[in-house]
Every structure is written in structure tokens, then in C-alpha cells.
Image (spheres, rainbow, N blue to C red):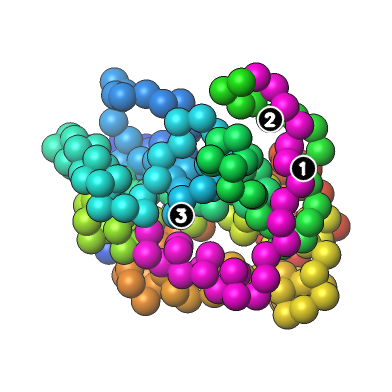
């Protein structure tokens, strides 16, 4: 068998990558990077308005945003690369001061401990509103709409669902942030229901081979602490 190295091509599902190097999603706000990776994953991109967790957050939920991303995807493709758009709802990590007063949401009304950075300075995290079952369904539909925008309009080669770092999907998965007593809380099967619904809707509008997901069940960022981290993995 011939030896392989990081710079050899790779077929990943329906994708043909120029090399085996992947650039992870980095919220660094850079316009360009000097090196090329076989696969680039963008920084997290909002799937619906009013859900910014950082000043300067990007989104993929409008035609104008998708048109802006076209410039990025074309540049990556011109250099022989592939690029996925990481789709995210930050849940309780969002802050009203970043979203024109829109209240942040979560599976349960449990806030992140500690502080966050706002344009006005450092502030405590804001207590979230617990989502109703109707709102949960709308949130799942927003992921699918953004995925379609990303691939069909913006020209991304696929999408990565952000299920890590204490944002909405992981907030559902984690028993410390999900105290619901309905079909979205309690057992791990129930806590994973929102994630499964997001994946099910996304893969109806985007080729399943072009949909990925990111987990971080051993990460304590944003007050995450899984009692069953290995099972989540």
C-alpha cells in the first residue's frame, strides 16, 4: 500500500479534497489567509436574526448575506479548496445588547455563569427565555433554511452544524443546561431530539454527504458540564 501524507488528495463522501488538511472554524475576523487547506470551515454563522453572541457576528439567513458569502466561496474555489459554512444558534450565549433588545433563548431558563464582552464593555450573561415547543420547531426550521441558503445561494460545498461550545444544540444535549420535563428533556434520547430534528430537516434540503456536525461534550465552555459526556460522544 502506498504511503499517504497530509498533502495527498482525499475523497470525502462526494467531495474531492486537494489535501487532508482542514481548517477548523476560527472566529478571527480575517479577510484572507496565506495558506490553503483541503477543507475550510467558516466561523459560526447565525441561522436567524437576533441571535448574535459576538460583536460582528455573521449570518446566512438572508439573500444579501448569502451574496456576501459568494465572494468568499469563489475565492476558496479559485484556489482549489472546499469550504463548509458552520451554522449556529448560540442560544443563551446571545445577549440582548447585541441584538436590539431581543431576549436570548435556551432549553431552560438557566443562564451562563460569568461574563461576556459587549461593545459597551464587560457584562454578566443575560438570563434566557425557555423555548416553547413551537419555538423549538421554528429554530429547527431556521437551520434548514440557512443550510439551503449556504449551499444553493452562497455556493458553499456543505454545512457544519454547530453542536459544541455551549450553544443551543449542546444546551439541549447537556443535562446541566436542559432541565425540561417534556419530550426534549430528561433522558439523553430526549435531549438529543432537537439535534436529530435539525439534522433531519437539513438533510432534506442539502445532500446528507455535505452535512457535518461538531461536538465538544468534554468542554466546559459556557457553563457546560455533561454528567454523561461519554454517552453523548
Q: In front: 21, or 65?
A: 65
Based on the picture, tell me whether residue 198 belongs to the magenta stretch.
no
Q: Are marks 2 and 3 in contact (CB under 8 Å)?
A: no
Is residue 232 toward the left or the right of residue 141 in the image? right
Residue 58 x/y as whole percent: 41, 39
Residue that badge 2 annotates: 116
Whether residue 56 is visible, yes or no, is yes
Location of residue 115 with respect to 73 vertically, above or below = above
Q: Nearer the viewer, residue 10 or 105?
A: 105
Secondary structure under tag 2 reads strand
- The residues bearing labels 3 and 1 have C-alpha atoms spaced at a distance of 21 Å
The crowding category of the residue bearing disc 2, from other C-alpha atoms within 10 Å (few below 14, some 14 to 19, many at least 20), is some
- Quarter of the image that includes the C terminus: bottom right
Which region shows up in magenta?
Answer: 121-146
Element class at badge 3: loop
Instruction: Identify the disc placed on residue 112.
Output: 1
Q: Between disc 3 and disc 1, whose residue precedes?
A: 3
Q: Is the Cβ of the residue at disc 2 closer than 8 Å to that at disc 1?
A: yes
Let me know if residue 145 is in the magenta part.
yes
In this view, the residue farthest toward the front is 101
Measure how far apart labels 2 and 3 are at the Cα level: 21 Å
- Vertical order, 10 against 182 (above or below): above
**Left or right, residue 198 beside residue 76:** right
Callout 3 touching callout 1 (CB < 8 Å): no
- The residue that disc 3 covers is 48
Of the residues tagged 3 and 1, which is closer to the observer?
A: 3
Please indicate, yes or no, whether residue 167 appears anywhere in the rendered image.
Answer: no
Using residue 33 as the reference point, say whether residue 126 is left or right of it: right
Say what secondary structure mark 1 lies in.
Answer: loop
Asked which quadrant contains residue 11, the reply is bottom left
Amino acid at each position: 500500500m502506498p504511503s499517504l501524507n497530509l498533502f495527498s488528495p482525499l475523497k470525502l463522501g462526494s467531495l474531492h479534497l486537494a489535501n487532508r488538511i482542514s481548517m477548523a472554524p476560527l472566529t478571527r475576523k480575517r479577510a484572507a489567509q496565506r495558506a490553503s487547506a483541503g477543507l475550510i470551515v467558516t466561523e459560526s454563522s447565525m441561522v436567524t436574526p437576533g441571535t448574535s453572541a459576538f460583536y460582528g457576528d455573521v449570518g446566512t439567513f438572508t439573500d444579501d448575506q448569502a451574496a456576501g458569502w459568494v465572494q468568499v466561496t469563489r475565492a476558496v474555489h479559485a484556489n482549489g479548496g472546499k469550504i463548509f459554512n458552520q451554522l449556529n444558534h448560540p442560544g443563551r450565549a446571545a445577549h440582548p445588547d447585541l441584538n436590539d433588545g431581543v431576549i436570548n433563548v435556551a432549553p431552560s431558563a438557566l443562564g451562563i455563569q460569568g461574563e461576556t464582552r459587549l461593545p459597551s464593555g464587560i457584562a454578566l450573561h443575560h438570563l434566557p427565555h425557555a423555548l416553547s415547543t413551537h419555538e423549538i420547531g421554528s429554530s429547527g426550521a431556521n437551520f434548514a433554511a440557512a443550510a439551503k441558503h449556504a449551499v444553493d445561494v452562497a455556493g458553499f460545498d456543505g454545512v457544519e452544524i454547530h453542536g459544541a461550545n455551549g450553544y443551543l444544540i449542546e444546551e439541549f444535549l447537556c443535562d446541566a443546561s436542559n432541565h425540561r420535563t417534556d419530550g426534549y428533556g430528561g433522558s439523553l434520547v430526549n435531549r438529543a431530539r432537537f439535534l436529530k430534528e435539525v439534522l433531519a430537516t437539513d438533510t432534506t434540503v442539502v445532500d446528507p454527504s455535505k452535512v457535518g456536525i461538531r461536538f465538544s461534550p468534554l468542554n466546559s465552555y459556557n457553563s457546560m458540564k455533561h454528567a454523561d459526556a461519554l454517552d453523548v460522544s
